[in-house]
Image (cartoon, rainbow, N blue to C red):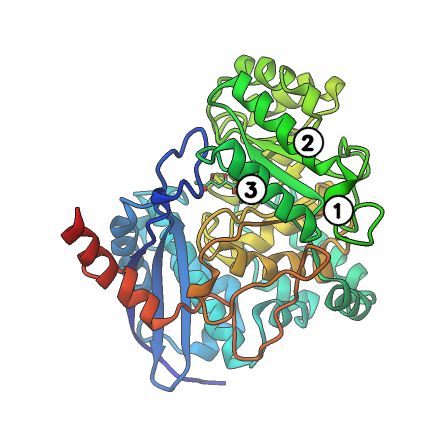
């Protein structure tokens, strides 16, 4: 079968001034302008594909430049031939010998590849008039395996093992799809606990999140232990108090809290250090926060330090605190080793730090094999829109479970997308159902015109007023 040809592409460096309000701040990233290195792929027909990768401001233009280099590899290619084997399409994107030298499979070139691979998947879903998750869960096990990036991971999972796992899950797919459409996908909220927020703002947003139905909450830690303990106690005092629960409910309605250090109302608290500590320091610091009963510490140390994470995990185990990481795990091999070394309790894939859907699938398969729940990272612009698709794929087709999982939600910048994610009254993500939405990442043209750096109307005006 032949289809339209990819003819050209456009990139946009889009930056939102979130640093003005402290949104997105943590111990390492104190000054974030949530940014999107955005691409649209065009074809000889009306079919298009949108994709992006996330950065936090300066440097976004470097990623856009790299996206141009990677996307050039698709120009002239037949779309149907690419869709017929998305694993081979992924290999092709990665196989430029000169570009590979500036990775390999890490850093700017890899996140740029993520944007391009995601745009191709968005185009594929649009070509089949399905949201992306539905395109993937409707694939046969053989099609899904052939769409996955398998190089360098076959010591952890072979194609045959993956096929057998997917076949075993085939029979329950319809029921799981119906269940998640009815209930929504479990979520947790981070946007009440950014480090740059005042205690009053944290308290107000936490109360709002509780009354919106959330029962898992994450706060940022790592710049000052006494202040973390104070903020943690403020959050605990709200989430453990039945008076703030939604009217008529006797306890939290949300996802399962078993084994997660839940408080008396069934509320779970997680903490995130964004890589600030050395290994021994991480252990001591987190122990000093034991009183606020975190389920896990996220990114306690350098993201490439697999054995460091393993050491932290085994030191914190007697204290009932787990370890999570992944938003800066730059490829599937890092996840492979985190899993092999039993270094994590929770696997936090990032939709565009990994090089797109094909590489995400390889991590979903490995995590399912190792029995580690996947709770994707979504603190950024566009990430919530992306990751609901990935968690649905994980639940319906790969792991078959959503009971322990929680998908991150931050309440920022959704209005800039044509198909924004949404949360139901139980504090869970709704399932995207629009046949035209693809991977839900298409941005409004007027948002691009306003926030494109440096000549968008917002930035021109902001310079004028400085
Ligand atoms: C810079 C980002 O906001 C980061 O703090 C997000 C993050 O760590 C998370 O959402 O988790
Ligand atoms: Mg984080």
Distance in Å between CA atoms under marks 2 and 3: 13 Å
Above or below, 79 against 165 in this view is below
Q: Dot 2, crowdedness within 10 Å: few (<14), some or many (≥20)?
A: many
Q: Position of residue 300 (x, y in %)?
A: 54, 26
Residue depicted at 39% across the width and 44% down the height: 21
Q: Is residue 61 left or right of residue 211?
A: left
Q: Which residue is mark 1?
A: 245
Do the residues under discs 1 and 2 have CB atoms within 8 angstroms?
Answer: no
Q: Position of residue 185 (x, y in %)?
A: 70, 58
Residue depicted at 52% across the width and 69% down the height: 85
Q: Camera-side residue: 173 or 251? A: 251
Mark 3 or mark 1: name the one nearer the start of the chain: 3
Residue 236 — which label?
A: 2
- Asked if residue 191 shows in the view, the reply is yes
Q: Is residue 172 left or right of residue 271?
A: right
Above or below, 90 against 252 in this view is below
Q: Camera-side residue: 321 or 351? A: 321
Residue depicted at 65% across the width and 54% down the height: 159
**Which of label 1 and label 2 is nearer to you?**
1
Q: Camera-side residue: 172 or 229? A: 229
Q: Dot 1, crowdedness within 10 Å: few (<14), some or many (≥20)?
A: many
Residue depicted at 46% across the width and 49% down the height: 380
Mark 1 or mark 2: name the one nearer the start of the chain: 2
Q: Which residue is mark 3?
A: 192
Q: Position of residue 3 (x, y in %)?
A: 44, 84
Mark 2 or mark 3: name the one nearer the start of the chain: 3
- Asked if residue 345 shows in the view, the reply is no
- Quadrant position of residue 136: bottom right
Residue 45 — which label?
A: none
Q: Is residue 62 left or right of residue 5?
A: left
């Amino acid at each position: 079968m032949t289809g339209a040809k990819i003819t050209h592409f456009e990139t946009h460096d889009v930056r939102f001034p979130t640093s003005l309000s402290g949104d997105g701040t943590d111990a390492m990233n104190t000054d974030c302008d949530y940014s999107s290195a955005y691409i649209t792929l065009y074809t000889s027909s009306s079919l298009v594909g949108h994709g992006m990768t996330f950065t936090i401001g300066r440097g976004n233009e470097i990623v856009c430049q790299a996206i141009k280099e990677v996307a050039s590899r698709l120009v002239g290619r037949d779309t149907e031939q690419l869709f017929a084997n998305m694993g081979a399409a992924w290999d092709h994107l990665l196989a430029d010998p000169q570009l590979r030298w500036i990775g390999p499979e890490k850093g700017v070139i890899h996140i740029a590849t993520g944007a391009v691979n995601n745009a191709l998947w968005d185009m594929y879903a649009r070509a089949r008039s399905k949201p992306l998750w539905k395109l993937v869960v409707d694939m046969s096990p053989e099609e899904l395996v052939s769409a996955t990036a398998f190089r360098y991971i076959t010591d952890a999972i072979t194609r045959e093992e993956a096929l057998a796992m997917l076949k075993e899950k085939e029979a329950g797919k319809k029921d799981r799809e119906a269940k998640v459409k009815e209930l929504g996908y479990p979520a947790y909220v981070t946007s009440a606990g950014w480090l740059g927020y005042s205690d009053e703002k944290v308290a107000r947003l936490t109360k709002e999140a509780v009354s919106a139905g959330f029962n898992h909450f994450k706060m940022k830690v790592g710049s000052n232990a006494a202040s973390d303990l104070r903020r943690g106690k403020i959050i605990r005092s709200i989430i453990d108090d039945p008076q703030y629960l939604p009217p008529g409910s006797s306890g939290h309605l949300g996802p399962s809290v078993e084994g997660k250090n839940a408080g008396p109302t069934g509320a779970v608290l997680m903490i995130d250090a964004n890589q600030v500590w050395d290994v021994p320091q991480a252990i001591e610091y987190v122990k000093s926060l034991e009183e606020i009963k975190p389920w896990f510490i996220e990114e306690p140390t350098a993201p490439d330090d697999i054995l460091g994470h393993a050491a932290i995990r085994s030191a914190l185990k007697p204290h009932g605190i787990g370890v999570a990481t992944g938003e800066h795990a730059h490829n599937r091999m890092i996840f492979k080793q985190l899993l092999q070394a039993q270094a994590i309790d929770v696997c936090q894939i990032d939709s565009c730090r990994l090089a797109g859907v094909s590489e995400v699938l390889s991590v979903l398969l490995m995590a399912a094999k190792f029995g580690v729940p996947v709770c994707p990272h979504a603190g950024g612009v566009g990430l919530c829109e992306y990751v609901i698709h990935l968690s649905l794929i994980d639940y319906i087709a790969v792991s078959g479970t959503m009971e322990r999982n929680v998908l991150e939600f931050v309440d920022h910048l959704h209005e800039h997308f044509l198909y924004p994610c949404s949360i139901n009254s139980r504090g869970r993500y709704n399932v995207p159902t629009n046949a035209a939405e693809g991977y839900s990442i298409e941005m409004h043209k007027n948002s691009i015109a306003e926030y494109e750096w440096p000549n968008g109307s917002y930035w021109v005006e902001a310079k004028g007023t400085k």
